[in-house]
Amino acid sequence: MVIRIGATTWTEHPTLLGVNRKLTLAEYAEFFPVVEVDTAFYAIPQASTVHRWRAQVPAGFQFIIKANAVITKHEQSTEYDLPTTVQTFKQAFAELKQYHQLQAVLLQMPPFFTVSRENILYLRKLRELFGDWPLTVEWRNNSWYRPALVKENMLLLQELDMSLTIADEPATQGNSVPFYPAVTNSERAFFRLHGRNLAGWQNPGAGWRKKRTLYRYNEVELNQIADAVKRVAAQAKDTTIIFNNNAGGDAADNALGLQKILGLEFTDLNPQQLDFDI
């Protein structure tokens, strides 16, 4: 049983070093063994960029890569765009998979991706196109969690060899998903913690993407999350927790707090430096 904790991106956690600048990946990897990379959602990087990432981290360091917007239906596309985009995506990140540093591809589906025959077939198509690549699905429409359907949908993910991304977010009327700690893949389980900023989540507008993750989990909440992690980790060989509450610089501190509660020690890290240019 392995438990890893990390955050979204490596640049947004200056509190780790007490500096007033963006962190490098090498510096981030002094503290955490896994990172989620969201940039591929907007533009798939060159394979040479991914190679440079690997050069900055230990051999056991893991990456979760957010799938491109075309792949997750955030952008309109034709039936011909999807296979081409998946192929380009796989070529870019093939080195991570080759060296066993790809923890998963995150399929964060859009809020309008409801439970339907068409969308179930789409998930099947994604599995077909990705082959044996590790995939984790984050549903953002609560129709997938309807009491009459949720067990069947978990079996669907199990059949497709996809992990459910266990999301934590504010409980809103109609536009949020529940915290549902289920294991659909015994190899890998994933938590993605967005914070619980209800006001920020419900009020789209200028700077919304930052405001909605402006949240700091308190000690009671971290202990509740830790209990859920323990239950899930007992059912999966590898469990990863990603803190996505980056807006106020709280993700790294919360990640370190959860690590302490769980009594974890991460050994495969970059050596910490003593002197930094502040």
Image (cartoon, rainbow, N blue to C red):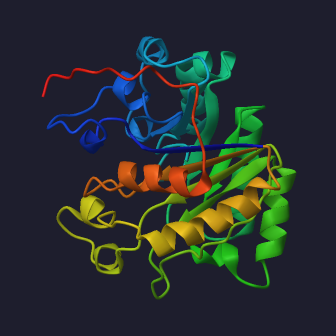
Residue 163 lies left or right of residue 80; in this view the side is: right
* Residue 109 in view of the camera: no
Residue 129 to residue 240: above or below: above
Say how many tags the image has. 0
User: Residue 10's quadrant in the figure?
Assistant: top left
64 or 82, which lies in front? 64
Q: Residue at left 49%, top 72%?
A: 221
Q: Residue at left 52%, top 20%?
A: 92
Residue 201 lies left or right of residue 238; in this view the side is: left
Q: Residue at left 43%, top 16%?
A: 56
User: Residue 254's quadrant in the figure?
Assistant: bottom left
> Can you give x and y, in whole percent of width and height, for residue 185 in the image?
80, 50
> Can you give x and y, in whole percent of width and height, for residue 239 in the image?
68, 48
> Can you give x and y, in whole percent of width and height, for residue 34 in the image?
53, 36
Residue 165 to residue 67: above or below: below
Residue 57 to residue 190: above or below: above
Which residue is at the far bottom? 173
Residue 126 lies left or right of residue 30; in this view the side is: right
* Residue 165 in view of the camera: yes
Residue 202 to residue 222: above or below: below
269 or 65, which lies in front? 269
> Can you give x and y, in whole percent of width and height, for residue 228 in the image?
67, 66
Where is the N terminus found, in terms of image quarters? top right
60 or 52, which lies in front? 60
User: Residue 145's quadrant in the figure?
Assistant: bottom right
Where is the C terminus found, in terms of image quarters? top left
